[in-house]
Amino acid sequence: VQLNSLYKESGYSVVDEKQFTVSASGQEQGVAMVSVVATYQDSDGNTLSHTDSISIQVIKKAALLSPSVLETPSLLLAQGASHPIRTNKDHTHTLHYTPLGGSPTGVATISNDGLVRAGNVGSVVLKIEVVEDHNVNQTLLLHIQVKPPFALLISEWGAPPAPAAPEYSYFTL
């Protein structure tokens, strides 16, 4: 765990010694113990101290594996097509799939195991909630668009066949 001032990115620094705020960012998966010792003098001039500790558990971030996401998590499907949604947490945690409100009905359905089936033309945002241990949840969002197919492209996978060698006939005169 790396501890930084809450104001580090803004360049602002707090000079009041009575304020203490940090942000913690996980560097690796595991558990870190952070302890704070506050030392002060009372009105009689006695030096006193107070210690407090907190345990921080760093978990692996949930990520979409399929569809593969380069920038914006989105999936484009033709009507009637289907596609499995896969995360790095599929076999280790409970996942809940919920379409977010305000979307047209019948655009897509999703099974409990993450299979999206395209229906009507439109778009919907799918919330994928990963339920971790100790009541920690992570949320992923996936924008699904369903459009009618306009063209069909048939291509051969792999390298094209090499051209045949020309045939020559030899004559003796």
Image (tube, grey):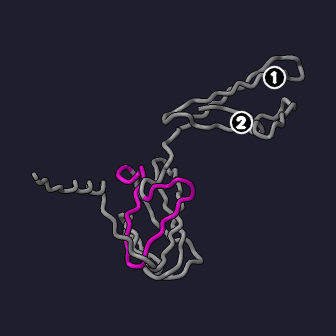
User: Quadrant location of residue 24?
Assistant: top right
Instruction: Looking at the image, tell me whether mark 2 or mark 1 is earlier in sequence order.
Output: 2
Q: Residue at x 44, y 59 (%)?
A: 67
Q: Which residue is mark 2?
A: 22
Do tag 2 and tag 1 residues touch (Cβ < 8 Å)? Answer: no
Range shown magenta: 67-92
- Please state the horizontal and vertical placement of residue 152, each as a whole percent of the image: 39, 75
Give the answer, above or below, for where 6 lies relative to 150.
above
Give the answer, above or below, for where 27 lies relative to 92.
above
Q: Residue at x 40, y 69 (%)?
A: 116
- Label annotation for residue 40: 1
* In the image, residue 87 lies in the stretch drawn in magenta: yes
Q: Main secondary structure of the magenta part?
A: loop
For marks 2 and 1, give the CA distance: 20 Å
Name the kind of residue labelled 2 in the image.
Val
- Please state the horizontal and vertical placement of residue 7, each as a whole percent of the image: 78, 39
